[in-house]
Image: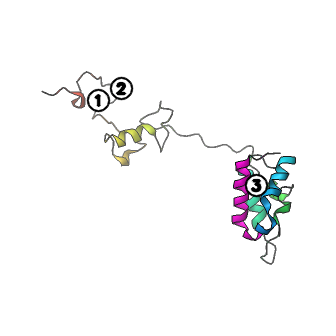
Amino acid sequence: MYRLSDDEGRRLTTIMLALRPDWAANNPGPKLAATNREHGLPGTNFDHCARALTAYATLTNDHGRYHYRTPDLYPRDGAYWETTAPDAGQRTKPKEPCPSHPDDPAGHWPNCGGCWSEIKAGDRPRDMLGKVYDTYGEGTGPATIQLTGSHPRFAKPA
């Protein structure tokens, strides 16, 4: 059982009334809050509760009419909780490291923080985001350059 926070309860009620404005007369907010306080909801997290609500509110019968006429049965166990449950074996794909910044924890392709900082500084073209690009010129990448004035960018004015 999952207990909604007050903010999650308000958001779920807003979603409920956006999906089914005809349920406003049932005053679902206080009923949902009371059920949540007493028992909680059969979901595993807020996302699951929102998916189950969407399935419950939009289910239609063979004639194209809504199956559920009121929101009162939503907090109880039903098939809509099982069909919308997150898959326990489902894993997200690991993020690929950026070829230019493989050791940077924020450097994952295609939204590498290192690449974006170089683009904003004007050191990398935008079309090279997440691609190998020698920012400092050929053969003088970050591993070989020293900040001693040997690179034109750091050279002292004559």
The residue beneath circle 2 is: 143
In this rendering, does residue 68 appear at all?
Answer: no
Q: For the residues marked 2 and 1, what is the alpha-carbon distance in whole angstroms?
A: 8 Å
Classify mark 1: helix, strand or loop: loop
Q: Position of residue 27 (x, y in %)?
A: 79, 63
| Kind of residue sitting beneath label 1 | Thr
Is 15 located above or below residue 103 in the figure?
below
Mark 3: amino acid:
Thr
Assess whether mark 3 and mark 2 are in contact (beta carbons under 8 angstroms): no
Who is closer to the viewer here, 31 or 154?
Answer: 31
Residue receiving disc 1: 140
- Indicate the position of residue 73 as horizontal and vertical percent values: 86, 61
Q: Determine which residue is flagged by label 3.
A: 84
Stretch in magenta: 1-22
Is 132 in front, or is 126?
Answer: 126
Q: Look at discs 1 and 3 and give the one toward the viewer.
A: 3
Quarter-wise, where is residue 65 in the image? bottom right
Spot occupied by residue 24 in the image (x, y as percentages of width and height): 76, 67
* Residue found at x 67% / y 43%: 91
Quarter holding the N terminus is top right
